[in-house]
Amino acid sequence: MLGCSLWGSEPPTPTGERRGAGWLELLLLLGFSASVLPQQPVGCPRPCECSEAVRTVKCVNKNLTEVPEDLPHYVRSLFLTGNQISNLSSAAFPSGVLTELSNLNLSGNHLAWVEAHALAGLPSLKQLDLSDNSLRWVSPEAFPSSGSSLEELNLRNSLKNSSFVSMLAESFQQGTFPNLTRLDLSSNNLLYLPLGMFSNVSSLQHLDLHNNSLVGLHDVSFRNLPQLQSFNLSNNSLKCLKNSTLLQFRSLSQLISLDLSNNTWVCDCNIEDLVNWLKESRQVEAKWALKCAYPEGMENISLMSINFSGLSCSELTDSQAQLQTSYVFLGIVLALIGAIFLLVLYLNRKGIKKWMYNIRDACRDHMEGYHYRYEINADPRLTNLGSNSDV
Ligand SMILES: *[C@@H]1O[C@H](CO)[C@@H](O)[C@H](O)[C@H]1NC(C)=O
Ligand SMILES: *[C@@H]1O[C@H](CO)[C@@H](O)[C@H](O)[C@H]1NC(C)=O
Ligand SMILES: *[C@@H]1O[C@H](CO)[C@@H](O)[C@H](O)[C@H]1NC(C)=O
Ligand SMILES: *[C@@H]1O[C@H](CO)[C@@H](O)[C@H](O)[C@H]1NC(C)=O
Ligand SMILES: *[C@@H]1O[C@H](CO)[C@@H](O)[C@H](O)[C@H]1NC(C)=O
Ligand SMILES: *[C@@H]1O[C@H](CO)[C@@H](O)[C@H](O)[C@H]1NC(C)=O
Ligand SMILES: *[C@@H]1O[C@H](CO)[C@@H](O)[C@H](O)[C@H]1NC(C)=O
Ligand SMILES: *[C@@H]1O[C@H](CO)[C@@H](O)[C@H](O)[C@H]1NC(C)=O
Ligand SMILES: *[C@@H]1O[C@H](CO)[C@@H](O)[C@H](O)[C@H]1NC(C)=O
Ligand SMILES: *[C@@H]1O[C@H](CO)[C@@H](O)[C@H](O)[C@H]1NC(C)=O
Ligand SMILES: *[C@@H]1O[C@H](CO)[C@@H](O)[C@H](O)[C@H]1NC(C)=O
Ligand SMILES: *[C@@H]1O[C@H](CO)[C@@H](O)[C@H](O)[C@H]1NC(C)=O
């Protein structure tokens, strides 16, 4: 009988008390299964399909609100997709029971809460699929504190709020996933990546961030990913990549597939470093397919074919440009003052004319006074007196 081999292969339970309880459970279960569901293999929870041969249990699209109890101990692959398990509590996977479970699929469950120790009781877990959920809270202690055995984590379209990525980043940084090779964070509407997010997941080989809203990668460090082979950044809102990021990509010796397609590249002078790097890099997929999205007149032009002499990019550094701007400003101010001065002059032209005449008249009177005195001095009859006295 299948049921016998099933129960026979179960490892002995550690305490005598548990063993007694186990026998009682076994008898009850056997009786229950035999009377109610004779066609089901022994030890398979009611809504599920179990196959011991391939060590797989499927409880798919059954409106389950909790992880079924009494899952067979042999299970290695557990599919709980398309249910309503919104809360994964610490009681979901009691420790020491599903010691062989390596592939857990909780995709499409409206999963919101993953509490402390919820997944700590699964020492062999290698693949965890949490895609298509709406996570609000994943406890930093959800996984074993000594480090999770997880190798593949799928979080595609699963974060309710893109700011929850910082919560995950914390787990990554603490070194919770020393063996993680594949991480899927696509379709989460991410606007930014927490700075040190990838500083302590150094075994990562495949990173998928496609279909998010990343605008730039400034300051995000990819340095500590020596094993990274593929990195998908397609379908984001990247505008430009700076030297600091490009240098990091260049230093990742295993990286052979970097997908930068379908981003909103802004093809102004700032993109020159990216284009130069692109031309010599062998890491980028389909580089000729990278197209400018802005500015006007540059749409759909391939980044690889931009002519920078045509863009009239000057060699000005920022401080020089600032200095020039301040000179231009000073010039404008001086011109304005000059214009106002001329306007005032023009508006007062009558007054000024009158004033000028007044001055001229005053001058003339004055000059006539001088002239008179000069004439007196120049009169020979009068000067003779003086000259005589000199002689
Ligand atoms: C799950 O619930 C929905 C709506 O409540 C219902 O239509 C559907 O039949 C249920 N499916 C199962 C397998 O019970
Ligand atoms: C999740 O389930 C646990 C245990 O069943 C319970 O204590 C906790 O309050 C639940 N959390 C939420 C948010 O429902
Ligand atoms: C999990 O289940 C979903 C839905 O059935 C499926 O698309 C996905 O490939 C599964 N993931 C794994 C790791 O098996
Ligand atoms: C990580 O993988 C190594 C080698 O396969 C293994 O020895 C180690 O136990 C794993 N770490 C964890 C936390 O499972
Ligand atoms: C996301 O969560 C943060 C903090 O909990 C909150 O301030 C923000 O409004 C949320 N955003 C959305 C789109 O719900
Ligand atoms: C990185 O992870 C290791 C365990 O893998 C941990 O011991 C170490 O403290 C972590 N580093 C930081 C800075 O948290
Ligand atoms: C892209 O992501 C959005 C959520 O940000 C999601 O609604 C949409 O289905 C995703 N598209 C694809 C093709 O996965
Ligand atoms: C790319 O993004 C657009 C707009 O957000 C979305 O409609 C489309 O499904 C995405 N494509 C892929 C392959 O993710
Ligand atoms: C990146 O993701 C998109 C959308 O799923 C896919 O079409 C593309 O092939 C991926 N790129 C690589 C290099 O795998
Ligand atoms: C970026 O690096 C290139 C060569 O490594 C250099 O020519 C260029 O001036 C750098 N750009 C900036 C903005 O520092
Ligand atoms: C590229 O992005 C546009 C708009 O964001 C979207 O409609 C299209 O499906 C995307 N293409 C691919 C291959 O992702
Ligand atoms: C750019 O290409 C897209 C898709 O091929 C097209 O819809 C759009 O009209 C093009 N824009 C310009 C300015 O040529």
Image: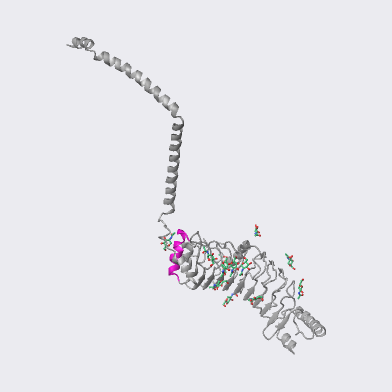
- Residue at 44%, 29% in the rendered image: 349
Where residue 96 appears, as percent x and y from the top left, is 69, 76
Image-quadrant location for residue 364: top left
Is 373 situated above or below 310? above
Residue extending farthest front: 350
Q: Quadrant of the N terminus?
A: bottom right
- Against 52, residue 139 (above or below) is above
Image quadrant in which the C terminus is located: top left
On the rendered structure, is 133 left or right of 320?
Answer: right
The boundaries of the magenta stretch are 267-281
Instruction: Give the residue drawn at x 64%, y 73%.
Output: 129
Residue 387 pos. (x, y %): 19, 12
Question: Is residue 232 among what the camera can see?
Answer: yes
Q: In this view, does 319 lie above or below 18?
A: above
Q: Residue at x 47, y 59 (%)?
A: 268
Q: Which residue lies furthest to the bottom in this view?
A: 1
Asked whether 391 or 168 is in front, the reply is 391
User: Tag count in the figure?
Assistant: 0
Q: Which of 225 and 265 is in front in this view?
A: 265
At x 49%, y 69%, the residue is 289
Q: Give the image quadrant in which the ligand numbered 4 is located.
A: bottom right
Colour setup of the view: one colour
* Residue reaching furthest to the left: 391
Residue 269 among those drawn in magenta: yes
Question: Does the magenta portion include 202?
Answer: no
> Is 387 or 27 nearer to us in this picture?
387
Q: Identify the main secondary structure in magenta.
A: helix
* Residue 12 can be seen, yes or no: no
Q: Position of residue 152 (x, y in %)?
A: 60, 74
